[in-house]
């Protein structure tokens, strides 16, 4: 019997060699500083160590600058600013006088401050000038930190840091905490921040109320039209009219005139663009009038109207140029930052009164554009704040016509004019050549109401 064919048995294929993946090593690093991207090596994000150290130094700087604010406020409370001879506490004395006067403001006695500012004056009034100063300093310090918080919430850390840096020179002679101008800045910035974050009605109403703290926020309103925030500008208009009617009913028709003319003052304020030249030619003729030092030369009747027209034309031009830039696809900082900065600066350049605290009005807008790489406007703003602090500290020498006090003031006013011109030029440039030294910014979408 033949043997059965033997079946060929196939050896199984050897198992493929197993290569276990190398264990993934996860190295935790601190977040990259604002505006920097991590370096990518072998598909793994790695942050260079010097950037981490740089971020730490930034936080140290922020802490130091914020502590300086607290120290400046504390200095005001222990430096006898309640004395009549102390120039820092001068306005606080006027606030206390207004709050203590019997009768209805505007109707029974003249008041140069709008109703929202008057409300803060009443709120911070104390039993005497010293007590008023304590409350006033506390209120302005809170508002200053609130402004920083708004910039952090509606924009970013870089913008908040820019504001802190640009305003720091004012702490050298900290008059900003003994004036009420931070109220209008806070209300106006609140309006823009709320609108940018999608709270259109609340933002429009806040921006309207800001105009009753100081007049300047009116020139910021066109951002609502350019950004097509219909609900916001309707809320702005309704609130503005309602508050205006309430003011007239309560205080009478003379209130707006008292505010706009600063209680009927006739002379040029000695620190204004025009008034400084008159004061330099005749310092002995300058005198106190309506709460400010004014020149011997009276302001002609036509001058106020001409200055108002020049200011209005500058504002309209700035917003027209900003609208073109925005329609061309520019970042929204052109309407939330650069255009408001130019408009407020125009008001200061063409104003018959230019007190040092007025530079507070445009600081948040300067911070917005500086944080996006506009070094030119940032440096100009820094120069203005530093020279404003110096001019206030040297006010007594300035009133006597001492040139070591006058030269910095001329330079400060020249920088304000430069800010206006440079801002208009930057707005007029085509989008592709936005501004020298300005880093392109990535547009961020904001929610709509």
Image (tube, rainbow, N blue to C red):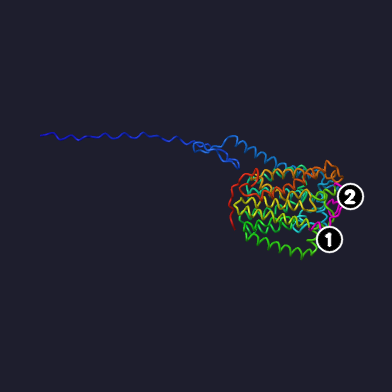
Q: Which residues are magenta?
A: 280-305
On the question of residue 99 being in view, the answer is: no
Q: Position of residue 69 (x, y in %)?
A: 72, 43
Q: Which residue is mark 2?
A: 285
* Residue closest to the eye, 196 or 373: 373
Q: Is residue 354 magenta?
A: no
Residue at coordinates 36% horizontally, 33% vertically from top-left? 17
On the question of residue 27 being in view, the answer is: yes
- Left or right relative to 428: residue 178: right
Label at residue 315: none
- Name of the residue lying farthest toward the bottom: 249
Per the model, the C-alpha gap separating discs 1 and 2 is 28 Å
- Name of the residue lying farthest toward the left: 1
Label at residue 109: 1
Q: Is residue 295 magenta?
A: yes
**Quadrant position of the C terminus in the picture:** bottom right
């Amino acid at each position: 019997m033949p043997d059965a064919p033997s079946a060929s048995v196939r050896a199984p294929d050897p198992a493929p060699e197993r290569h276990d993946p190398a264990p993934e090593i996860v190295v935790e690093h601190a977040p990259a500083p604002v505006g920097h991207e991590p370096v990518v090596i072998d598909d793994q994000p790695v942050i260079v160590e010097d950037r981490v150290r740089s971020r730490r130094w930034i936080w140290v700087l922020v802490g130091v600058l914020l502590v300086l604010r607290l120290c400046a406020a504390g200095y005001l409370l222990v430096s006898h600013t309640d004395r009549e001879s102390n120039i820092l506490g001068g306005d606080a004395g006027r606030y206390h006088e207004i709050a203590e006067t019997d009768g209805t403001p505007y109707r029974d006695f003249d008041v140069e401050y709008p109703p929202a500012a008057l409300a803060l004056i009443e709120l911070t009034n104390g039993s005497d000038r010293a007590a008023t100063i304590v409350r006033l300093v506390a209120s302005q310090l809170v508002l200053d930190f609130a402004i920083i918080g708004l910039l952090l919430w509606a924009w970013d850390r870089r913008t908040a840091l820019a504001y802190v840096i640009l305003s720091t020179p004012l702490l050298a002679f900290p008059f900003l905490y003994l004036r009420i101008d931070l109220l209008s800045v806070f209300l106006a910035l609140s309006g823009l921040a709320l609108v940018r974050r999608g709270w259109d009605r609340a933002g429009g109403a806040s921006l309207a109320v800001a105009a009753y703290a100081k007049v300047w926020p009116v020139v910021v309103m066109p951002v609502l039209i350019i950004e097509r925030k219909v609900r916001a500008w309707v809320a702005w208009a309704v609130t503005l009219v309602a508050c205006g009617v309430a003011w007239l009913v309560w205080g009478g028709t003379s209130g707006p005139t008292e505010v706009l003319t600063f209680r009927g003052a006739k002379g040029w304020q000695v620190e204004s663009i025009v008034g400084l030249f008159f004061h330099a030619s005749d310092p002995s003729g300058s005198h106190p009038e309506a709460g400010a030092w004014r020149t011997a030369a009276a302001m002609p009747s036509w001058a106020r109207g001409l200055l108002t027209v020049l200011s209005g034309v500058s504002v309209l031009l700035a917003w027209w140029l900003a609208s073109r830039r925005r329609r061309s696809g520019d970042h929204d900082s052109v309407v939330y930052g650069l255009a408001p900065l130019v408009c407020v600066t125009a008001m200061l350049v063409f104003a018959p009164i230019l007190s040092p605290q007025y530079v507070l009005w445009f600081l948040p807008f300067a911070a917005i554009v500086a944080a996006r790489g506009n070094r030119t406007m940032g440096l100009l703003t820094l120069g203005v704040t530093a020279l404003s602090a110096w001019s206030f500290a040297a006010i007594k020498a300035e009133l006597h016509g001492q040139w070591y006090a006058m030269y910095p003031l001329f330079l400060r006013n020249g920088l304000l004019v430069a800010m206006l011109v440079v801002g208009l030029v930057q707005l007029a440039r085509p989008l592709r050549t936005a501004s020298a030294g300005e880093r392109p910014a990535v547009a961020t979408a904001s929610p709509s109401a």
